[in-house]
């Protein structure tokens, strides 16, 4: 079956530090890959996505590249701000006809950015 | 102009009670979902409806019954609540039930069963 593995948190950083959150996946079809972010007390919102191999998703200074050869979709940001403190979820949705858009999430990585 | 809304935001109830959570989306989407987030933040899909028809049912206990009166609404009714049902429940919607389509999430309903 499909699965998503992401690094455990919490990840604690100082403002302006470089952030990487590792995410690897297993899938039977050709999945689309997503990063969602959950700010404290809120629902999830899409941060970025990539729908095929070698695609790069980017938004708000965050980037992730769909690497089929390493089955990875690592999230990076060059200079984090306190406002980036949140829980980040890597997720996949398979392309198979009967997947019906079902999102499979990783366990989430809490990121804490200190001033 | 909230895209996906849920009510109530908080729900505290006793074991054995029956409760409902309502979800509405004003995005014109065809597909709606319910997810459960446990205390460790792990998210798992429960149900999905497309055009009012059930398309995903992830081996959720029969005590959980989703109902979609129209494309814009997907409600979740829970019978005989148990302690293990305590969680945050998120509603989401997408234009179509395809893998590449973005899902838009509501703010969540925190259910506490005492």
Image: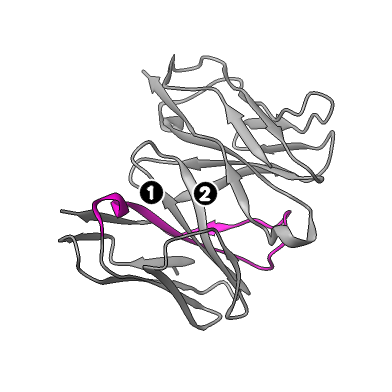
Report the front residue among A14 and B72. Answer: B72
| Residue at the image point whose x is 46% and y is 31% from the top | A84
**Residue at 67%, 58% in the rendered image:** A101
In this view, A71 is above or below B67: above
Q: Nearer the viewer, residue A69 or A66?
A: A69
Q: Which mark is residue B70?
A: none
The residue singled out by tag 2 in the image is: A45
What chain does badge 2 belong to?
A
Protein chain holding label 1: A
In the figure, is residue A45 to the left or right of A43? Answer: right
Provide residue A97's location: percent of width, then percent of height.
79, 61
Q: Quadrant of residue A49?
A: top right
Dot 1, crowdedness within 10 Å: few (<14), some or many (≥20)?
few
Figure disc tally = 2
Q: Quadrant of the N terminus of chain B?
A: bottom left
Q: Position of residue A98 (x, y in %)?
A: 74, 61
What's the residue at 45%, 34% (across, down)?
A: A87
Residue stretch in magenta: B82-107
Mark 1 and mark 2 on one chain = yes
Image coordinates of residue A20 in percent, x first then y, are 59, 20
Using the image, determine if residue A35 lies above or below residue B53.
Answer: above
Tell me: residue B50, above or below residue A49: below
Taking the magenta stretch, the answer to whether it contains residue B98 is yes
Q: CA distance from mark 1 to mark 2?
A: 9 Å
Whether B101 is among the magenta residues is yes
Q: Work out which residue is located at the far bottom of the displayed protein and give it.
A: B69
Dots 1 and 2: beta carbons under 8 Å?
Answer: yes
Q: Tell me the number on the disc at residue A42.
A: 1
């Amino acid at each position: 079956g499909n699965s998503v593995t992401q690094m455990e948190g919490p990840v604690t950083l100082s403002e302006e530090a470089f952030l990487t959150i590792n995410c690897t996946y297993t899938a039977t079809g050709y999945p689309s890959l997503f990063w969602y972010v959950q700010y404290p007390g809120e629902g999830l919102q899409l941060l970025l996505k990539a729908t095929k191999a070698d695609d790069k998703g980017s938004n708000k200074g965050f980037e992730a590249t769909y690497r089929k050869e390493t089955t990875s979709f690592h999230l990076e940001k060059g200079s984090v701000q306190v406002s980036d403190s949140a829980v980040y979820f890597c997720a996949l949705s398979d392309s198979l006809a009967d997947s019906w858009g079902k999102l499979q999430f990783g366990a989430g990585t809490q990121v804490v950015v200190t001033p | 102009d909230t895209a996906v809304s849920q009510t109530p935001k908080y729900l505290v109830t006793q074991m054995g009670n029956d409760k409902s959570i309502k979800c509405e989306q004003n995005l014109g989407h065809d597909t709606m979902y319910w997810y459960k987030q446990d205390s460790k933040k792990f998210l798992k899909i429960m149900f999905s409806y497309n055009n009012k028809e059930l398309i995903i049912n992830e081996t959720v206990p029969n005590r959980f019954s989703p109902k979609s009166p129209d494309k814009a609404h997907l409600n979740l009714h829970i019978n005989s609540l148990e302690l293990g049902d305590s969680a945050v429940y998120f509603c989401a919607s997408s234009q179509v039930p395809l893998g590449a389509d973005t899902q838009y999430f509501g703010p969540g309903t925190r259910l506490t069963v005492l």
